[in-house]
Each structure stands twice: as structure tokens, then as C-alpha cells.
Image: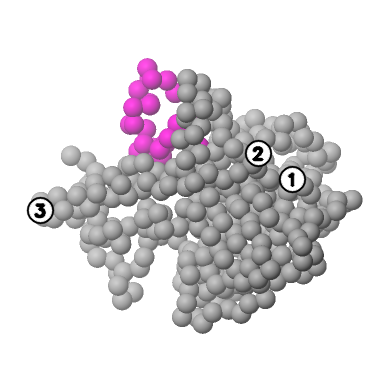
Amino acid sequence: MIGLRHMSLAATALALAFAGAGAANAQAVGVDFGDLKSGITVAGPETDKAAINAPMTEPGYKIPRLKDGRPDITGVWSNASNTSLRRAGGSKNLVMTDEEQKKARAGNASNIRQQTDDNQKLSDGKLDGKDLASGRGYNSFWIDPGNNYAIVKGTWRTSWIVEPANGQVPTKSGAGGGRGRGGPPAAGGGARPAGYGYNNPEERNINERCIILGTSGPPIGNYLYNNTTRIMQSPNHVVIESEMIHDARIIPINGTHKPNQMAPWMGDSIAWYEGDTLVVETVNMQRGGGSVQLSPGGKIIERFTRYNDKQVFYEFEVNDPELYTQVWKGQMSLNAVNGMYEYACHEGNYAMHGILEAGRKADKEGRVANEAGDDKE
């Protein structure tokens, strides 16, 4: 797809603020931990176990409270990070030592891209748009994935997943029927017709149609940009708003689930407090965070606990025997940031028209628009 991508006004503001600056200096609102040290010098299974089971609140920290006495987790938080849902190849353990983190950060491909734009120059012809086909929709000025690995409960992490211990999603072999990826199914559940995706806007996937992207949760994910989440609490509800496509989950406290016939994009969520932790249970989900799939009978539990003034400790577990071999769990840190910008999705302004126009051109020529080579003249 060619066209303007998901771009918040944050990027526009930064463009003006950094006019004339080099791309290497034009970093956005991700959290910079500087020279923070975890003090971990030995990595391995025992270190991982201790980190996973460490206290949910920083020792000695006094949790702020709302007027009704409940824990205060309101604020704007970011999970922009080099850490991702799944553990990358080459990372054996969940927890890194300070030296391992320093080396991994220096060699991280995303960080190198943000610092150097892979040394692209106007003179080498790579910035004229021809590199779009290889997946480079932007140069580094326009992205904000974060340039630090996550520090969760004081330890550097290689993945959000903590269970299973290998940091991978335990998908069942041949499992199907999950909701959460791609575009809508064909009418009647049959095979998609020839030219699917070029016949009408409804055949394009929900990302392109600016309906939803996977950062909103559950579980909350991280992406190329717009990794900011706003949490708001009232006596009867909690609102979890994602910067990406400004999706908001409005969740009743001590509520009951809706009838099964109602399946919102981000699921049917209810919440309650267990001591100083906000617990959110989601079922009947159409589309989850980070492209996590869930069958109609699956369930996701999230837990939010104030770790200190600068972090909320976020946990999630996915329970879906139809799709996964076991319950799998993750831990994440949500880091305090100064604010959240208005989001505007520009996916369909020019690209959608071009895609459908190509379909009609193929119709006139007696071709199928999505056949091999349809992008060649």
C-alpha cells in the first residue's frame, strides 16, 4: 500500500520543531532511561525467576490514592521500547545484565536506523520513494518505536512474555478460528472471490480502514509509533485510551459481561480492584493488541499496579485452550510521559482511491487485480 500512513499530530509538531535538524536528532516522545543501571551482573533461569516474582510495587513506595481510597493509576504512559511481545532469536534469557543490555541496544537494528537512517542520502537514490517496496514507508524522522529495552521491576527485559520461559507464543499446531488478524472474512464464510481486496473498501483490512490497530489491547502492544496510553479512573469506570487511532476502552467497575452476540473490536471488558491492583477481564474479542488472537471462548486478564511515580506495572495472561497449548503470560512497564497528541489517520485519503481504481482498471482489461504481477506494467 502506498500513501500516507498512520500519523499523529505528534509527528507534525516534531517536524516543525526540528526543522533543519538531522534525522538522527529528531527523536520523538519515547522514554530515555539514560545510563540507568539494573545492577544485574548474572543472567540465567534463577535471575529470571526472581525478576518475575519480584514485588509489584517498588519497595518503600507509597501508592497515591483517589478520593475513594482506590489506587491512583491515572496518567499518560508509554511502552515505546526495543522490547517486543516475543523474545528475539539469540536471546536465551528473559533478563539481561547491564552489559548485555548495553550491547543489545547498540546493535539493535531499529536503533541503528533511528540514529543513521541506514546512512541513506539523497544522492544514493534511496530517499525518492523507491524503497517503499522493501518496507521502508518512512525515514527515521517519522517514527518513535523507542530506543531502549524495557526495564520492568528494575530489570532489563528481552520480551514481554514471561511464561512460557522461552518467551514465545505457545500456539497450537494447526489451530484456527481465532479473531484478531487480517481483513474481514468472505460473505458466508466461503473462499474469498477473485480480486478480493480491490472490489470495495470493506474488503481492505481494518488497519487500512483506520478502524483499529493492535496497540490498544488487550493486551496492550507496542508499535512503530504512537505507543502512548492514557488511563482515566472514576468511581464506576476506568477508561484506557490508546494514542493509535484514539481507541478507548470504557470499562465498567464491578460490571457484568454483555450478551455473547455483542463482540466489540477490543472485546467485552469488566474490571474490579484486588487490593492495590486494577484487574480487567476481557472476553468475546474481535481484535486484540499486538495481533493477539482469541477464539470465541478465550479470555484475557490484565493487571495494573502502580510501581512508582514513573511506572505502572502491567501484567497480562491469555487463556484460550482452543488456540494455545497453555495459559501464557506477560509483564510490561508503562512509563510516565508528559502528554498525548491528537491522532489523525490518513490511510484512506489517496491510497484507497488508488487501490480501487486499479481494481476497476483490471476489470476493464479482463484481469484479476491481485494476480501475480499486477503491480507491473
- Label 3 secondary element: helix
Q: Residue at x 56, y 35 (%)?
A: 28
User: Observer-nearest residue: 74 or 333?
Assistant: 74
In the picture, the disc for residue 364 is: 3
Label 2 close to label 1 by CB (< 8 Å)? no
Vertical side of 183 occupied by 227: above or below: above
Q: Residue at x 51, y 27 (%)?
A: 17
Amino acid beneath label 1: Lys
Amino acid beneath label 2: Val
- Label 2 secondary element: loop
Q: Position of residue 159 (x, y in %)?
A: 66, 49
Q: Residue at x 61, y 53 (%)?
A: 230
User: Observer-nearest residue: 153 or 118?
Assistant: 153
Q: Position of residue 5 (x, y in %)?
A: 40, 43
Residue picked out by circle 1? 310
Depth check, mark 2 against mark 3: the one in front is 2
Residue picked out by circle 2? 31
Q: Which residues are magenta?
A: 118-143
Q: Is residue 315 magenta?
A: no
